[in-house]
Image: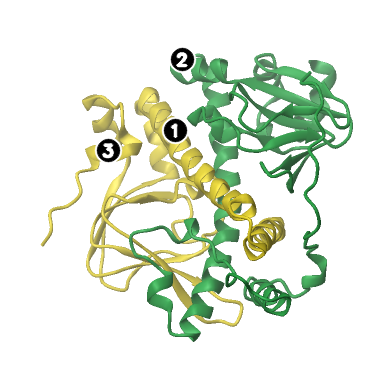
Chain colours: A green, B yellow
Amino acid sequence: MSDFLPYFRTLPLFTGVPDDAILAIAQRLTRRRLMAGQTLYHSGDPLRAAWFVIKGSIEILSAGGRQVLVVPAGGAICLAGLFTGHPPDMTSIAMDETWLLELDRDLFLQACEGTDPFGRLLVERVVMMLAHQLRRFDSALLRLEASAVAKARKKGRAAECVPEDKPAQEKLHRPPPNATDAELMEWAAEMAKRSGIDDLDKIKVVQGPEIPIRRGPIS
Amino acid sequence: MAREFDLRDAQVFAGMTEEELGALARAGHREVFQPGEAVFSGKMRARAFFIVGSGGVDVTVRQPDGRSVVVATLHPGTSFGEAAMFDGQPRNAVGSARGTTACWVLDADGLDRLRHESPTAATKLMINLGRSMAERLERIVAQVNESADGDDTRSSRFAGVMSWKLLDRLMGKH
């Protein structure tokens, strides 16, 4: 594992962690290598681990086969599942040769129950990374939601847009059903503008056929 | 006046013994806010986790054009600031008291005291907070996915894809 130490040091998982603790934690994890196009997990597979991308990148496809996110080196996959155990509802595929650190869920749960200081440090680091992921989603969703509320208020529909008993972050705005192309583009431009994005052209909108899922063996 | 929410019923304190709850009580503190008073804002109380005991907290987001919009109201029993307590980044929104509001507050110093006084309580709290954040994250992702793949109307697909693209761009800004 020590030959990978320079890579480990760059991972947010180990930010501020001394080298001896990094190596002690890394020994509890499994190093994995995927080739381009190889599947890490399919949507609906039992959740058995979370992964930290050391090198390369992983694309996340929705159940319908659309690419929704790309996780680069330093990113983490399925952290929430370590706590909930829910099967992933998306599919993950290596975009190029990719190295990962695998954290087995059973081992993580043992660390949660145990008193081993390195196990506790691992749990704490995972919680911190989860907090960071949630913060990024929350921040983006709050801005989207605020734009939707502002627009609705303009039309005098604020009350129906903000149910008081539901966190705003969990309610997304949608364009009108059966909208024309022009209406859809107008809606998208308004959402982008209200969210502080001034150059809509930089957002590539995929409206073509579904992206086929490249099925590969799970290594 | 309505009875204050019993903190022992909070999900993030699940599985705690009486001793551990006592350590938590000593690590955190109760704060009362007057109507309209800021509960959190920007860097103010950035590293703190709250549970609303009574009253409520209006969450406001400032728009690029300078106007503020209330996007949610947090009621007794609701916890917030889990993520902020760990990363210490400035708040994304402003929280202000809706009427006289009491909150239980645990800040980073309090968490350090808890780690020292009761490591088991600190670990249980950490795990409970992790579970709470994990569930919230999964709900958000599921909802965005539902937009992307849920029904087959073109506008829904478009909304789903746009949601992910916008989220991706917005998340890249932080």
Sequence-first disc among 3 and 1: 3
- Kindly identify which numbered label has been placed on residue B26: 3
Q: Which mark is residue A115?
A: 2
Where does residue A76 sit, x and y in percent of width and height? 68, 36
**Is residue A48 left or right of A162 when viewed as pictured?**
right
> What's the residue type where badge 3 is placed?
Arg
Mark 2 is on which residue type? Thr
Packing grade of label 3 (10 A; few <14, some 14-19, many >=20) is some
Q: How crowded is mark 1: few (under 14 residues within 10 Å), some or many (20 or more)?
A: many
**Above or below B51: residue A60:** above
Q: Is mark 2 on a helix, strand or loop?
A: loop
Position above or below: B79 against B14: below
Q: Nearer the viewer, mark 2 or mark 3?
A: 2
Circle 3 SS class:
helix
Q: Element at badge 1?
A: helix
Which residue is under mark 1? B126
Tag 2 near tag 3, CB within 8 Å: no
Specify the subunit that label 3 lies on.
B
In front of the other: B61 or B32: B61
Count of picture labels: 3
Q: Residue at x 20, y 49 (%)?
A: B5
Which of the pair A99/B30 is nearer the observer?
A99
